[in-house]
Image (tube, grey):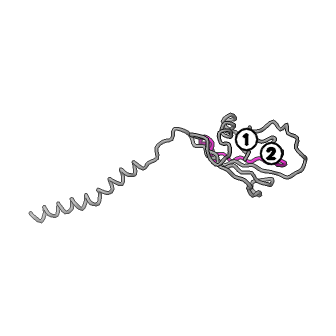
Amino acid sequence: MRTLVRRAIVCGLATAGVLGPMTVTGAAAKAAAPEPRLYAPTALVLTVAQGETAATAVPTRAVTLTCTPTAGGTHPAPQRACAELRSVEGSFDKLGGEGTRPCIKIYDPVVVTAQGTWEGRRVNFERMYANSCVMQSEGSSVFSF
């Protein structure tokens, strides 16, 4: 009888020793789960490069831009760039200046890109300008860096 009691105690302790850490690990996993966000993510990488397409051009400048919860990143004017993007609901195709600045007619193509997410939506934008003067005239503050 004593042997039976000893075996029951040993088995109980062994089971607690094996299963005990699992319950702690389960609780720790629940505590480490990310909290739901109150806003959709906005994180972009913006580039400017010499060339006709992003596939063949090497970026000469690149910055990051985040707009939620606050404007930031390495962009020199993140508040202005985020405000401009919000005004067009994140549609890069709708961005643009007035194009009233006179520019010389030299073909030296510049390509701008935006990749990342805007308010949770995937962004993959590319636009080519005839030269840097045209880019500054017709472009937006988003690509002014």
Distance Cα–Cα, label 2 vs label 1: 10 Å
Q: Position of residue 20 (x, y in %)?
A: 29, 56
Specify few, some or many for label 1: CA neighbours under 10 Å numbering under 14, 14-19, or 20 or more: some
Residues drawn in magenta? 116-132
Mark 2 element type:
helix
Residue at x 81%, y 53% (from the top left corner): 52
Residue visible at 77% across and 38% down?
96
Name the residue at 21% across, 59% down: 12
Q: What's the residue type where badge 2 is placed? A: Met
Residue sitting at the far right: 105
Majority secondary structure of magenta residues = strand
Disc nearer the start of the sequence (2/1): 2
Where residue 80 sits, quadrant-wise, is top right
Give, as a three-letter code, the residue at label 1. Ser
Name the side, left or right, on which 119 lies relative to 100: left
Quadrant for the N terminus, please. Answer: bottom left
Mark 2 surroundings: few (<14), some (14-19) or many (≥20) residues within 10 A:
many
Q: Position of residue 48 (x, y in %)?
A: 74, 51
Is 133 placed left or right of 22 in the picture?
right
Please give the residue where the numbered disc 2 appears in the rendered image.
Answer: 135
Residue 43 position, x and y percent, is: 61, 46
Q: Which residue is mark 1?
A: 141
For image coordinates 22% across by 60% down, the residue present is: 13
**Residue at the top extreme of this rendering:** 87
